[in-house]
Image (cartoon, helix red, strand yellow):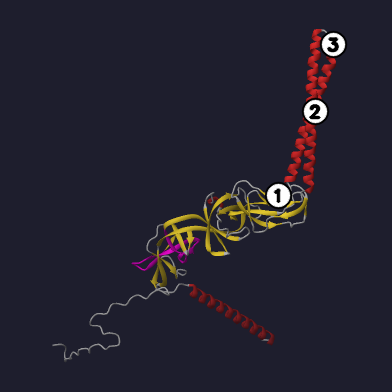
Amino acid sequence: MTPVRIVAGLLILALAGGLGWLVWVKVQEKSQTEEQGRPPAGPMAVEIAPVGSETLRDLRTLTGTLVAASEFVAAPKISGRLERLHIDIGDTVERDAIVAQLDDEEFVQQVEQSRAELDVAKTNLEETTANLEVANREYARVQTLRTDGIASESDLDSARNILQAQKARHKVAQTQVIRAEAALKAAEVRLSYTTIRASWQGGDDRRAVGERFANEGAMLSANSPIVSVLEIDPVVAVVFVAEVDYPRLSIGQEASIRSVAFPSREFPGNIVRIAPLFRAASRQARIEVQVANAEQLLKPGMFVGVEIELAVAEASPVVPIEALIDRAGRRGVFTVDAKTNVAHFVPVRLGILERGLAQILEPALEGSVVTMGHHLLEDGGAIRIVQPPGEAPRPAPEASETDPAPGEKGPPAQQVPATAGGTE
């Protein structure tokens, strides 16, 4: 055999040995893994808890922002210089109270001019009224003379024409008076626009000033904002709710509002508006909760949490959430057979989850359920109940009157003499 064949044979043997070693290592690792995952032999040590009866609430806590119940901006209807500002940020304003005053000199002059034009129109009306009365008397006189054959037909026509002309002048004078009165009223209205008032309909008679947008001396154009007026009793919490909870909300539903500014206070409220549409971007609908704010502690713009109770389950069977476990895609619990110390897996239908408890809708459970140690437990597996940490130790059996007290020695045991061959 040539040296080349010898070397090749040795290489083949070495490769075969290496492959065999790798296979042996893999088999050992798999065997160890199966041993670790396999439940230990004998009863499984578990902790249990009794099936209880509690009242649970299905709560949703939504975050949102407070806004004023109503808000408007006080602004002038005409342009002018802001001469006087009567209120400022944080002040209280009464209904129809004066907010600001514009320079009104030009508008006062317009009112005076309109009033003078009205006086001229009224004087002209008085003159035409007098001329009309004269024309009426003259026409009546000529008509009588014509009946008596003294006046001619042309005299009667002339008197009639004069009367018609005086009637037309009188009507024009009346129209001029009406026009002058309207001009005076318009001038007075424009003059009233120089006084800006805080006017609103409904609600409380007192509101607050939220912002100031202009200072005294500023030139304002029509509709330039001066101050914002807010109704902050009540305030409104605006939150957004997902589709899954939307059908469970209704107008008038109670809510509880908390603010980081007052962590120890809860403010009651009620749902007053539910939007009939969802935002395309967030798939959420706007909900408005009205909150009484008589102390005016809550302010628009505050970040708040709104807690809404969607459902209440009174005296319902409950188990600790730790007792829930999944088996073969089903959620359930392990119930305990106290007589045989055997655990059985029971699929359940859950209801409300709150305070670490789970409501069991189906089936009806009794006794106790496993809360710890059930991850390696199989249906029908034997269990050994252990005491949970922190639980008071079970009381020891009571000592009999003949038992020695702690630290004392008991009476010496009586010695029975032994006899050869047994007892006598």
Q: Is residue 84 above or below residue 190?
A: below
Mark 3 or mark 2, which has the lower sequence index? Answer: 2
Which of these two is toward me, 179 or 365?
A: 179
Q: Quadrant of residue 164?
A: top right
Badge 2: residue crowd in 10 Å (few <14, some 14–19, many ≥20) = some
Q: Is residue 112 above or below residue 358?
A: above
Residue 147, image x, y percentages: 79, 9
Residue 348 visible from this viewpoint: no
336 in magenta: yes
Q: Which residue is mark 2?
A: 127
Mark 3 residue type = Glu
Question: Between marks 3 and 2, how big is the CA–CA gap?
Answer: 29 Å
5 in magenta: no
Residue 348, image x, y percentages: 45, 59
**Secondary structure category for the residue under label 3:** helix
Instruction: Give me the residue at 32% from left, 77% from top.
Output: 396
Q: Which residue is mark 3?
A: 153
Mark 2 or mark 1, which has the lower sequence index? Answer: 2
Extreme top residue here? 149
Mark 3 or mark 1, which has the lower sequence index? Answer: 3
Residue range in magenta is 316-344
Which of these two is toward me, 213 or 374?
A: 213
> Of the residues tagged 3 and 1, which is closer to the observer?
3
Q: Which residue is mark 1?
A: 196
Mark 1 residue type = Ile
Question: Between marks 3 and 1, how big is the CA–CA gap?
Answer: 66 Å
Mark 2 residue type = Glu
Extreme left residue here? 424
Magenta stretch, main secondary structure class:
strand
Extreme right residue here? 154
Residue 391, image x, y percentages: 40, 74
